[in-house]
Amino acid sequence: MSPSLPPAPQRPRALMALSTALVLGATAALAAPAAALAAQGDNEAVIGVIEQATPSVVTIQTDFTQVAEMAEPAPEASPAPEASPAPEGQETPEDQQSQDFQLPEGFQLPDGAEMPQTWDDLQKLLPQDFQMPEGFEFPGGIDPFGGQGGFAIPGGSGSGVIITSDGLIITNGHVVGDATDVTVILDDGSVLDGTVTGVDTLTDFAFVKVDAQDLPAITLGDSSGLRVGQMAISVGNPLGSFPGSAAVGIVSGLDRSIDAYGGFGGAERLNHLVQTDAAVNSGNSGGALLDGDGKLIGITTAQAGMSDGIGFALPIDLAKPIIEQAKAGEPIERPYVGVLFREIDGQVAKDESLPVTAGAWVKGQEGGDSPIVEDSPAAEAGLQDGDIITAVDGLAVDRVNPLDLQVLRFAPGDALTLDVLRDGETIQLPLTLGTRPADLGQ
């Protein structure tokens, strides 16, 4: 019988626990740097994009107080038939019943709601049980529902993006308003005098020029190939108080249309917007929307009121033709085709027994005028009632790239080729763009 060994000494449980903790702690300490490096590496590309782009984004201030007259109520517009096509594919905005009071920048009224005429009306638009902060006053002591005549509109603050090293900056039209001179604050804090050189009332782009050299210009991207889900980074000065703020999100939607309200100004219809969940707050207007490579794909323009994560930017491709005009010191002009059309989708194709489910159907109202404007570029190119335009210079006309959006990527005088489906056959028609008449409206 083998002799039994004496029992092993029992280590105090507290000591064992401490030893285990020290071992785990040491292991964690060794692993921590690697984990930290891995986490940092995951975001390094985004950090690099933000660091590279931020110096190109500036703050724009209208450093004066403008006195404006209370606007007369806009005349009521007769509703158009539902199936009526709009000139150049643009929808005509509904006239507002009153412009005496406007919602904060980027906010939208709920469907079916009317502009408030009294404080009670305003309260109905606010969330249930919402109370104005104690002592709240509108800027400058303005009472938007009281008094007649003029009222003071405080100078505003927005963002802008440097697009040339010699000081050309792109921003939003509603950022500069009617100002001719603005103050531009660079990312390094330098303050420069800026001159508004042009405003595109069709799309809400505007240009500011400063007298400077060797500025950090952004690289323009391509918005025509954007896809829902790809990375989007916004950089701007939210609330006019936090310059260089960045937010990361995705492209949430394409070709959106909204009615935007700015401060105490009027409402305007904005079309072909890029939707994003990257933060777009008041003050971000005119700022940059970047892709994952740090290229400029849009100018942040509006936010959806009483919502979270719904912002909008104008796609940069809409600005490219007028950027060239601004660089050359030319007045801003937009192209013109002179045709009425209806966008085709699956339902329209089914209802009208059309042979394709995407394109621009050249079609006027029954018994109405021809959809081809007389002596227009469309007439000279030989477009006919009933034609379906399926591509512009080889790029398909569809929901993501509708006809009017594609045309806006060109300048007056540019020559392009239309693919047209006529009587079951595809033909190609050369067309030279004209200049959009100033009185055509949106």
Image (tube, rainbow, N blue to C red):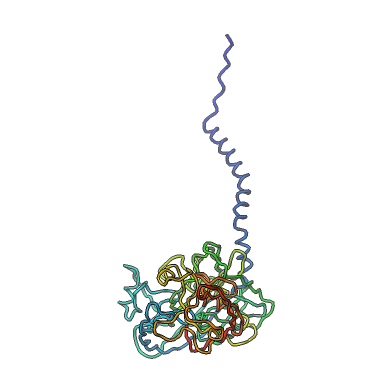
Residue 270 location (% of width, % of height): 47, 77
Residue 346 visible from this viewpoint: yes
Residue 284 location (% of width, % of height): 52, 73
Quarter of the view holding residue 205: bottom right
Q: Residue furthest right?
A: 214
Q: In terms of depth relative to the viewer, which is nearer, 315 or 208?
A: 315
- Quadrant holding the N terminus: top right
Residue 233 location (% of width, % of height): 56, 66
Count of labels in the image: 0
Residue 283 visible from this viewpoint: no
Indicate left or right for 159 with 98 as reference: right
Indicate left or right for 353 with 230 as reference: left
Give the residue displayed 67% in from the left and 77% down from the top. 165
Q: In terms of depth relative to the viewer, which is nearer, 302 or 255?
A: 255
Is 52 located above or below residue 372 in the figure?
Answer: above
Residue 256 location (% of width, % of height): 47, 71
Give the residue displayed 52% in from the left and 33% down from the top. 14
Q: In terms of depth relative to the viewer, which is nearer, 244 or 267?
A: 267
Q: In terms of depth relative to the viewer, which is nearer, 423 or 154?
A: 423
Quarter of the view holding residue 269: bottom left
Is 425 located above or below residue 76 in the figure?
Answer: above
Q: Residue furthest left?
A: 120
